[in-house]
Image (cartoon, grey):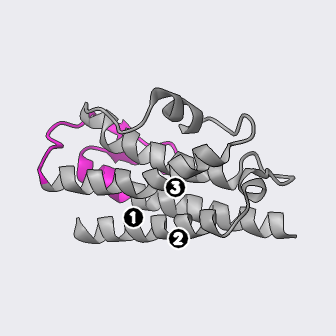
Amino acid sequence: MDFTFQVLNNIRTIFNKIIENNTLEDLNKVPKGFNNNIIWNIGHIVVTEQLLVYKLSGLETALSEEMINKYRKDTKPNGHVSQEEVNEIKGLLFSTIQKTQDNYNKDLFKNYNAYTVSTTGNTLNNVDEALQFAVVHEGLHYGYVMALLKAIKN
């Protein structure tokens, strides 16, 4: 799983740079033809990893219920995200994945409730599969963020 964690860290480094290199206004902008924005996508990948890995393993996530409810699947931006919240999401990019890797290495994820993901139809049966899917999911949202960046710069 070292490679999987390496990829997740690399994707999150890219997301971190996107946060740093864009204004709060641009992070919040929902361009015509889109239903979300850059910061929603980044918050969403943080929440999704926690739900797929921790919640489905029957463990507590590192996130507040408010954050989970705001960025989980089937949500969309509901107003302007403050700089404070952007900073929180930015910090969670690395703290959550580091905690996941530490807990994975401690063999903390003993149980797993199988879950079929809507995007591909695959059923996740264990934490290894959840982490592998997280890579796919974060790559998907990276592509979406790239499209958003192009749309807001035009």
Residue 16 spot, x, y in % from top left: 53, 65
Instruction: Please tell me whether mark 2 sits on a helix, a strand or a loop.
Output: helix
Distance from disc 3 to disc 2, alpha carbons, whole Å, reads: 11 Å
Question: The residue under label 2 is which amino acid type?
Answer: Ile
Instruction: Please tell me whether mark 1 sits on a helix, a strand or a loop.
Output: helix
Residue 122 spot, x, y in % from top left: 40, 48
- Using a 10 Å C-alpha cutoff, classify the residue at mark 1 as few (fewer than 14 neighbours), some (14 to 19) or many (20 or more): many
- Which residue does the numbered mark 3 point to in the structure image? 90
Residue at image position (33%, 50%) is 130
Q: Earlier in the sequence, mark 3 or mark 2?
A: 2
- Depicted 57 relative to depicted 104: above or below: above
Q: Is residue 124 left or right of residue 92?
A: left
Question: The residue under label 1 is which amino acid type?
Answer: Leu
Instruction: Please tell me whether mark 3 sits on a helix, a strand or a loop.
Output: helix
Q: Which of the two residues, 36 or 39, is positioned nearer the viewer here?
A: 39
Q: Is residue 121 visible?
A: no
Q: Is residue 128 visible?
A: yes
Q: Earlier in the sequence, mark 2 or mark 1?
A: 1
